[in-house]
Image: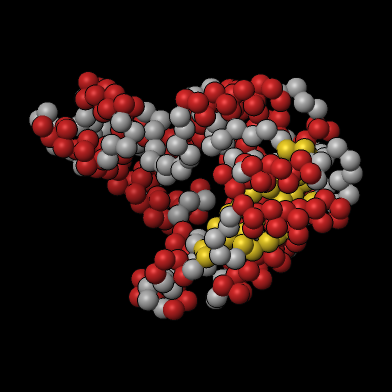
Amino acid sequence: MCLLCYLVREQCKNIRDKIVDLLKAGMGYRTIGKQLGEKATTVGAIIRKWKKFKMTVNLPLSRVPCKISPREASMIMRKVRDQPRTTRQDLVNDLKRAGTTVSKKTISNTLRRHGLKSCRAHKVPLLKPVHVQACLKYANDHLDDPEEEWEKVMWSDETKIELFGLNSTRRVWRKKKDEYNPKNTIPTVKHGGGNIILWGCFSAKGTGRLHRIEGRMDGAMYREILANNLLPSVRALKMGRGWVFQHDNDPKHTARATTEWFRKKHLKVLEWPSQSPDLNPIEDLWRELKVCIAQQQPRNLKDLEKVCMEEWAKIPAAVFANLVKNYRKRIISVIANKDSVTPLKSTYDKNYRLLHALLEERRGMKC
């Protein structure tokens, strides 16, 4: 026990003993309370306990024995480790078959005592061994690249943004009777209310153009997007000579005609491993963009496109510089997690928290 806890405990015992002594001296509850600076109800509770048990110290609390034995707890932990998607009801049924009846709350408490809690499973690309090896090769090949090299890269990607895409995760503060008040409900429509597909790019110097893709994109449309948006973005950001373009291995990106287009334009393309979105820092920007759009609550696809363009242009320049500056940490994370291309959660969250903080500071409000 720490010294402070010991002193507080001793002080409480001394006060209780003084209350009993003053009671024996003929003082009333209120008089004792005023003299010792305690409430009359507190004085009365201490005196009643003294009269009943002839003591002033707290009685030890009775502990309810755990219904789950150490052996059964080990069985639960073993099953959860082998099958993380096991539900609490499954574990309740397993124990019932073993002769022990417990509630799901007891299961939760047991798992928490062993350091486990229920979390939402993250969605990640389905990886084959060849994908893992390709990502490791990319990480090792570029591990020692200086920061200046990444500053020359123009990152790009496409994303789908739904009109009501993030509304399902929002919460409201309300009273029970106001559950159907329009302010406390979320309008839903079939198929997310429609969506738009965006192509965007950025570098350490800032955002490039954001383009809405109309219809189904093929190789010809992709090359037109690059000509009308990528090249003007490079000139606007003053990338200079020696810049490198990054895109994934979508068939439209790697088509022979597209490869020939890059050759004729004398553009260098970064060799990219398949199924590795977490290696692309633009994913951080897409995530924040979708959060901001959900807060704006656009009512139709035209408004959705307008909000996307506005929010994309408002992202602070410091965000891009930080994403590129910390790119080596992503590479180190891939090497550290040899069986996965997903970066270490702490590294990703650190980048995202900084991104979020910078955007909050710009808006002057909490996102």
From the top left corner, tell me how far across and down residue 320 is, in percent: 76, 47
At x 71% / y 43%, what residue is drawn? 260
* Residue ID at (21%, 38%): 90
Res 224 → quadrant? bottom right
Closest to the observer, 8 or 96: 96
- Locate residue 322: give its quadrant: top right
How far across and how far down the image is residue 336, in percent? 58, 22
User: What residue is shown at x 22% (from left), y 42% (from top)?
Assistant: 89
**Residue 363 coordinates in the image, percent (x, y):** 72, 63
Q: Is residue 339 left or right of residue 223?
A: left
Nearest the camera: 222 or 331?
222
Q: Position of residue 43 (x, y in %)?
A: 40, 50
Give the left or right position of residue 324, taking residue 125 as reference.
Answer: right
How many marks the image carries: the answer is 0
Dividing the picture into quarters, in which one does residue 212 lie?
Answer: bottom right
Q: Residue at x 44, y 62 (%)?
A: 168
User: In the depicted view, which residue is nearer to us: 268 or 173?
Assistant: 268
Colour scheme employed for the rendering of this structure:
secondary structure
Asked whether 336 or 131 is in front, the reply is 131
Q: Is residue 221 above or below residue 322?
A: below
Q: Furthest-bottom residue in view?
A: 182
Residue 323 shows in this picture: no
Q: Which quarter shows the C terminus?
A: bottom right
Residue 91 visible in image: yes
